[in-house]
Structures are given as structure tokens and as C-alpha cells.
Image (cartoon, rainbow, N blue to C red):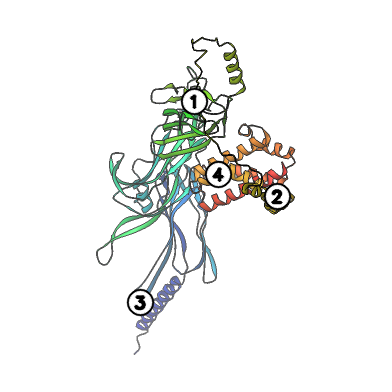
């Protein structure tokens, strides 16, 4: 007999089992895409981890904009897949580490992804950022470790210098022994406005042991700069910023037991600094003070003090020592009008170290006397401000007398001599009438006549021999005189070589070359236009040249050369650029000389 109750119970069990399998299969086919935050509330100095998790692989992941936060790490992907009791488990996530930018309440908006042709979006979540906490509760990330163990510091030798007093900035990158730096590159270099600046080359990066805030660190010197403030008051120094690649220990080890590192990029900045520049005191400032600041020696010397007329001698005005040697003007030599003097040749032997400029600068004058006599060179004085003592010092040279032994007398000397002769008294010596000699000492002398002699005929034929030479010389001279264009070109080129000779000697030495080139351009205009161009701006020079009917292209080339001379103080210029500027200056002077 069939037991219908048992059959009914068995059917019920089979139905429940099949339903469970169907429900499990249906649950496994459901797609989930959600956003998880490490915490809903955090301090300003903490980090927020955001994970976007899905149970199916997808494409075209589109994260939110993270308004109010900075992405310090991410996105990083992780995938996990497993089979448990015949059931497959799959998970994929995109992770971000965020740093809040300010306090407040923010919303992490929706992210989206395409899975199986369908677009899925996560739910937005709110986050509150509070004031910084003493001890961040979240786990330190690689970026956090880099924050605490990497510092860029600008060490300034003096924060309250005098105007035109040297200060030094050394940029040091401090690295804790807990991390290592594999690479760096500058993001923003300071421009040092209102300062005269020069970089001191760092030959090689070498790590040294030191301390930072009482803790042991290693540091490298990245940049060294010497500055001379050109303006008094509070001057800002822009920060130096670097992008540094840092290797941070992760606390994990690989299969072979070696420590694993996490790499991150960190932006560090030395921070903006303010320098309070003191003006030079006005009390007791000498009348001839010309802006020299430092500690100097001053000398005026000549190559010789005794010579003949039309010979030359060199007079040198030299300032040596330590200070702003490139930033002031030397005193000018004062000479009697009877001495002819040429434009001075400027010589600069200055090197810049961490202590500032040191060396010497000089002007050498060539002097040619025209008349016999004694000519005094009046004493010269040079004043400078010594920041160590806070006082002005004036140095004065000795008087130098130039003794011209042989040569013509000047008109004033002749009149003086005549006056002295007229006033000379006659003194009797008592021997006005001496005894006449009675015996003569005469000898016979052969008489030869020039007329008809060999010399007579040679001199007679000599003019006839010179006639062809005179004809050739005249033709050559007429050909040269007729070449008007060639004469102008030769004259212009000779003038260019005259003014640019000092610059040509300094080719390869950037600073000395452009100082000499700028002086040559100004001296040329001074000679041609009879003006002091050093007192004029470039606009004024342009106006003067336009009035002289110089064409616009030549004026632009001349002004461009002046700009290059100024830019060379702060920018690197190659030897090729210097040669090009020298050739261009020669060409411009030649062209201008034809038009003036």
C-alpha cells in the first residue's frame, strides 16, 4: 500500500531545495557597486580613504571630483576572486587617499561604472572635516610618512642687512633615515625681485649628517644664492618648490623576506621669506659716496712719473676688497688740460663666493703729455660704507707729479721764460777782454767741386727715376679716394673695432663681456652725439637716434643689444650668444656711423 503522506513530505523537501538553489543563483547574478569611506568625520591633518567596490568587472570607471579634498594617492586597483564550495566570489575596488583642504562639511558625490552594458552609480556620502587633531587616528600612509620625514629649508645668512650688503641663501633638503629619495625636480624657482643675485654652482650632491628640530637627519645642499638687496624696506623672497619621489617602507616583506617599499611623489616648499633691508644712514654720508658697501682698499698709481713729450703712460684707479664691487662707479681721474687722456679701459677681476663678491675693479687711463714741464695729478678720494662698523670710510690717494723732461714748451711756458730773461741782470766776471792768440793753427784743405761730379749726375737722374713711382702712387691714391663706399666701410669698421676692443678681449667671460659691451655702446653714442647716454633710458636713446634719422631697424638692434647686456646679469648666456652679440654690435656701429 502506497504511503501518500511520505510522498507528499518528500515532494515538499525537493521543492524547498530547488527553490533555495534558484534563489542562490539569482542572488549571485545581482550586481553591486558601492562607495565606502574610512570614516565619516576626520581632522584637518588626517587622511580619508575612499573605496569604490563592485562584485563584477566593469569598464569606464568615472570617479567624482572630490570637491574640498586633494588626492594624495590613487586610484589604486585591487581584485580578489575565490571559489568556496563551488561558489565563485569576485570583488574589484578602486581606492583613493584624500587630504582635506579646509574645515567644513563636504559631500563625496556619485561615481559611475559600466558593467555588462548597464551603468551603475554609487550613493553620495557626507563627510565632516574638523580642526586638526593632536594624534591622527588613521593609519599612516606613504604620503603621511613623507610629510613627517622630508623637509626643504632655506637658510638665510642675515635677515636684516643694509642696502647693497651681501646675504646668502642655502637651500637644504632634509631626509629622515626612515625614508629615501630617488629623484627630484624643481617646480617653481624664485625670481629674487629687487635683488642682484648670482647662483653659486653646486658641483655634486653629497649627503651629510645633520639635525632638524633636534632629530638626526641627512641633508643635501641643492642650491646656493648670493643676493645684494637693491631696495630698502621689507622685501619678499619667493619660495623654492620641488617635486620629490620618495620611497617609504611599507612594513611588509616579500617572499624572500626583503622589506617592501611604497613610492610616492611629494611636493615640498622652502616657504616664502621676508628680508628687512635697512637703508644706509644719511648722517655723516660723504658727498662723493657712490653706493659702495663693504670693506675696500683704494689706490691711484702710474706706470711711470718721468717721460718725454709724446710718450705715453698709464694711470690706474683701483678698488679692491670685499663688497658690491660690480654695483658702484669708480672715481674719475682729474688731469691738467696740458695732458691728453683717452677713454679708460675697465678691468674686472671679481669672484663671487658664499661670502659675497671679492676681488678688484680698475680703470686704466692712457695719458700722453704734449709739452715739457711738471704736471700734478690731484689726490682722489673714494668713500664706502662698512656694514660691520656701521660707518662711512673715506680713502684719499697721494698727489702724483708727472715730470716731462724733453719736448716743446707750451705758450705759457715760453712767455714765462721770456719774462724771466728780460728780468735777468748782467754780472761782470772780469774776463770780458782776453789775450789774443798770435800763432794760428791752420791746415790745407782740398777743394772739390760738386758740379760735374758723380754725385751731381746721380742727383740729376734721381727725379727721373722717381716719376714712375709717383705716377703709380697717385693712381693708387686716386683709386682709394674714388672708392667712397669702401672708405666709409673701412672707417666704420675701424671705429667699431676701437669701441669694441675691450669687449672682444672678454669673450667667454659672460659678466665682464657684457659690462664691456654695454660701456662700448654708451661710449660710442657719447662720442658721436656729444651726450652722456648713461643718464638716459632706452626710450630717450631711441628718441635721440630717431632725431638723427637713423633707420628703425638699426635703432631696434641697438636697443636689443642694451637689453641683452642687462639680461646677462640674471640669465645664462652661451659663448655662441656672446659671439653673436659681438658681431651684431660691430655691424650696428658700422651702419650707424654711415648714417650719422
Say if mark 2 contacts mark 1, CB within 8 Å: no
Alpha-carbon span between mark 4 and mark 2: 29 Å
Alpha-carbon span between mark 4 and mark 3: 93 Å
- Residue 485 at x, y = what percent? 72, 50
Q: Residues within 10 Å of mark 4 (few under 14, many from 20)?
A: some
Q: Let me know if residue 557 appears in the view.
A: no
In this rendering, the label closer to the viewer, 4 or 2: 2
Q: Residues within 10 Å of mark 2 (few under 14, many from 20)?
A: few
Q: Let me know if residue 38 appears in the view.
A: yes
Give the secondary structure at mark 2: helix
The residue positioned 43% from the left and 74% from the top of the image is 25
In this rendering, the label closer to the viewer, 4 or 1: 1
- Residue 183 at x, y = what percent? 39, 55
Residue 304 sits above or below residue 187 on the image? above
Residue where numbered disc 2 is placed: 477
> Residue 528, labelled with which disc?
none
Alpha-carbon span between mark 1 and mark 3: 118 Å
Say if mark 4 contacts mark 3, CB within 8 Å: no
The residue positioned 51% from the left and 37% from the top of the image is 346
**Residue nearest the observer in this picture, 14 or 350:** 350
Residue where numbered disc 1 is placed: 403
Mark 4 / mark 2, whichever is N-terminal? 2
In this rendering, the label closer to the viewer, 4 or 3: 4
Alpha-carbon span between mark 3 and mark 2: 114 Å
> Residue 501, labelled with which disc?
4
Mark 1 / mark 3, whichever is N-terminal? 3
Mark 4 / mark 3, whichever is N-terminal? 3
Amino acid at each position: 500500500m502506497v504511503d501518500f503522506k511520505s510522498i507528499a513530505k518528500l515532494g515538499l523537501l525537493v521543492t524547498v531545495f530547488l527553490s533555495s538553489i534558484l534563489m542562490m543563483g539569482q542572488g549571485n547574478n545581482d550586481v553591486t557597486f558601492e562607495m565606502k569611506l574610512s570614516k565619516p568625520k576626520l581632522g584637518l591633518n588626517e587622511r580619508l580613504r575612499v573605496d569604490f567596490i563592485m562584485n563584477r568587472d566593469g569598464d569606464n570607471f568615472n570617479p567624482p571630483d572630490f570637491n574640498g579634498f586633494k588626492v594624495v594617492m590613487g586610484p589604486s586597483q585591487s581584485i580578489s576572486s575565490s571559489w568556496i564550495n563551488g561558489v565563485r566570489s569576485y570583488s574589484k575596488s578602486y581606492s583613493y587617499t584624500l587630504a582635506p583642504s579646509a574645515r567644513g562639511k563636504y559631500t563625496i558625490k556619485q561615481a559611475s561604472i559600466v558593467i555588462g552594458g548597464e551603468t551603475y552609480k554609487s550613493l553620495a556620502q557626507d563627510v565632516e572635516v574638523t580642526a586638526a587633531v593632536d594624534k591622527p587616528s588613521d593609519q599612516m600612509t606613504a604620503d603621511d610618512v613623507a610629510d613627517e620625514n622630508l623637509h626643504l629649508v632655506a637658510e638665510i645668512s642675515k635677515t636684516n642687512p643694509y642696502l647693497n650688503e651681501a646675504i646668502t641663501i642655502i637651500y637644504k633638503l632634509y631626509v629622515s633615515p626612515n625614508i629615501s629619495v630617488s629623484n627630484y625636480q624643481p617646480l617653481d624657482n624664485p625670481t629674487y625681485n629687487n635683488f642682484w643675485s648670482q647662483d653659486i654652482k653646486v658641483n655634486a650632491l653629497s649627503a651629510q649628517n645633520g639635525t632638524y628640530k633636534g632629530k638626526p637627519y641627512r641633508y643635501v645642499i641643492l642650491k646656493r644664492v648670493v643676493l645684494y638687496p637693491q631696495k630698502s624696506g621689507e622685501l619678499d623672497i619667493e619660495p623654492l618648490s620641488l617635486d620629490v619621489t620618495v620611497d617609504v617602507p611599507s612594513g611588509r616583506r616579500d617572499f624572500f623576506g626583503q622589506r617592501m617599499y611604497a613610492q610616492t611623489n611629494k611636493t615640498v616648499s622652502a616657504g616664502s621669506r621676508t628680508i628687512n633691508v635697512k637703508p644706509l644712514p644719511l648722517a655723516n654720508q660723504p658727498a662723493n659716496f657712490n653706493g659702495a658697501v663693504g670693506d675696500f682698499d683704494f689706490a691711484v698709481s702710474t706706470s711711470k712719473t718721468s717721460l718725454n713729450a709724446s710718450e705715453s703712460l698709464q694711470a690706474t684707479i683701483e678698488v679692491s676688497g670685499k663688497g658690491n664691487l660690480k654695483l658702484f662707479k669708480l672715481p674719475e681721474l682729474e688731469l691738467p688740460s696740458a695732458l691728453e687722456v683717452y677713454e679708460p679701459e675697465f678691468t674686472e677681476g671679481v669672484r663671487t663666493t658664499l661670502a659675497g663678491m671679492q676681488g678688484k675693479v680698475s680703470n686704466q687711463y692712457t695719458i700722453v703729455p704734449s709739452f715739457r714741464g711738471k704736471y700734478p695729478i690731484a689726490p682722489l678720494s673714494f668713500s664706502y660704507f662698512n656694514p660691520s662698523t656701521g660707518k662711512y670710510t673715506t680713502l684719499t690717494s697721494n698727489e702724483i707729479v708727472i715730470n716731462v723732461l724733453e719736448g716743446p714748451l707750451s705758450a705759457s711756458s715760453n712767455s714765462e721764460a721770456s719774462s724771466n730773461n728780460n728780468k735777468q741782470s748782467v754780472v761782470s766776471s772780469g774776463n770780458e777782454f782776453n789775450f789774443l792768440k798770435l800763432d794760428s793753427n791752420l791746415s790745407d784743405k782740398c777743394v772739390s767741386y760738386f758740379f760735374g761730379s758723380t754725385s751731381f749726375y746721380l742727383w740729376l737722374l734721381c727725379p727721373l727715376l722717381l716719376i714712375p713711382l709717383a705716377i703709380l702712387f697717385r693712381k693708387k691714391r686716386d683709386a682709394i679716394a674714388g672708392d667712397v663706399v669702401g672708405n666709409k666701410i673701412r672707417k666704420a669698421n675701424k671705429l667699431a673695432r676701437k669701441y669694441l676692443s675691450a669687449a672682444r678681449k672678454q669673450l667667454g667671460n659672460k659678466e665682464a663681456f657684457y659690462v664691456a659691451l654695454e660701456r662700448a655702446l654708451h661710449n660710442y653714442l657719447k662720442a658721436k652725439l656729444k651726450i652722456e647716454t648713461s643718464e638716459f633710458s632706452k626710450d630717450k636713446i631711441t628718441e635721440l637716434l630717431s632725431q638723427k634719422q637713423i633707420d628703425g631697424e638699426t635703432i631696434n638692434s641697438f636697443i636689443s643689444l642694451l637689453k641683452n647686456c642687462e639680461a646677462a646679469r640674471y640669465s645664462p648666456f652661451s659663448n655662441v650668444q656672446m659671439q653673436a652679440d659681438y658681431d651684431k654690435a660691430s655691424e650696428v656701429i658700422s651702419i650707424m656711423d654711415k648714417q650719422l
